[in-house]
Image (cartoon, rainbow, N blue to C red):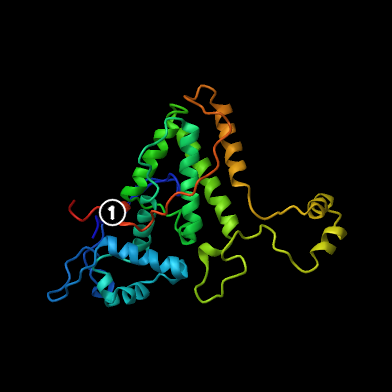
Amino acid sequence: MYQRQKLLFGSVFGGDEVMAAPTEPAVGPGGRRRAGQAPPPGCRTSLSPERLALAAIALADAEGLAAVSMRRLAASLGVGTMTLYYHVRDKDELLDLMWNEFLGGHLLDDIPADWRTALTEIARRIRQSFQRHPWALGVAVRPALGPNKLRYLEQYLTVASRITDDPDEQLRIIHSVSDLVVGCTLRELGGQAYRDPDEPAGEHADGPAPLLEPQPGFDAIVAAEELPRLRSLQTAGCRLLTPRFEQALGWLLDGIEAAHPGARQASPRSVEAATPAPDLVGTAATTRMLPKKGA
């Protein structure tokens, strides 16, 4: 059960405003108790924010974000649906818990001293997790704060502060890197982030989705519309499919370095090939949930 005062912050996968949600009455429409209110006598459960988040993540991993509902979650936990409302206000708050848990797996134990190496490691790590957990892309722009989002932002700011002392410029650097990660991964995964659990998985469900799906008449359209550049790519057998993330990230970091020639400890342009990081999402060691009420 969490503090009812929510902050919305516009940085890293979020909006652009800072605001506080209004205080709500303890009892909602129809007499339903608000989350955080004590359950009635005799209603005992072993539910916790950690357990709710991990169960919801397991459901999303198996069937996609669209499968996550209060009813389905309650069934997976073996409790009544109404029981969940003593622990979370609604599905939106449940999604906030899931996102907070997801970010907990991306907090570096040691931030590399070199800003370029650090940004590369941060970007690669969260991209790998998006690939393993496509549903997370569907909640990546949620603005509500949790402890792990604050820690993740602090981690990013620590690196950006080695590039510039201007806070606004630091946020622009952070947004540039995070937008590249989300954009490239969305293109690679296609619609998996929003897949309907009742729809059969497509042919690219287990791999990168093409940027341009082959369609009937494609060759004829290219020829008829006099699109020589597309024809040359097609003739050469080039894939218009998988974004070259590493190259795009390198270009972005080159641009940041060029714009900030005084950045401390800039590394050489060549960066070692990515090594898959362990999947820490949903592990007890990285579960750092929203503060308990009264904490």
Q: Residues within 10 Å of mark 1 (few under 14, many from 20)?
A: many
Above or below for 106 versus 251: below
User: Quick check: can you spot residue 202?
Assistant: yes
User: Quick check: can you spot residue 91?
Assistant: no
Instruction: Locate residue 24 relative to residue 9 in the image: left or right.
Output: left
Image coords of residue 272 (percent x, y): 54, 38
What residue does disc 1 label?
Answer: 290
- Of residue 81 and residue 244, the one placed in the foreground of this image is 244
Instruction: Locate residue 28 relative to residue 252 in the image: left or right.
Output: left
Say which quadrant the N terminus sits in. bottom left
User: Which residue does the image show at 57% across and 66% down from the upper left?
Assistant: 205
User: Which residue does the image show at 21% across and 65% down from the upper left?
Assistant: 26
Image coords of residue 111 (percent x, y): 39, 36
Q: Residue 55: which quarter of the image?
A: bottom left
Instruction: Locate residue 207 relative to residue 32 in the image: left or right.
Output: right
Image coords of residue 285 (percent x, y): 30, 52
Instruction: Locate residue 52 relative to residue 215 in the image: left or right.
Output: left
- Say which amino acid is labelled 1: Leu
Q: Secondary structure at mark 1?
A: loop
User: Which residue does the image show at 40% across and 52% down from the upper left?
Assistant: 143
- Of residue 55 and residue 68, the one placed in the foreground of this image is 55
User: Which residue does the image show at 55% across and 53% down from the upper left?
Assistant: 185
Above or below for 74 versus 157: below
Image coords of residue 158 (percent x, y): 39, 34
Q: Residue 99: which quarter of the image?
A: bottom left
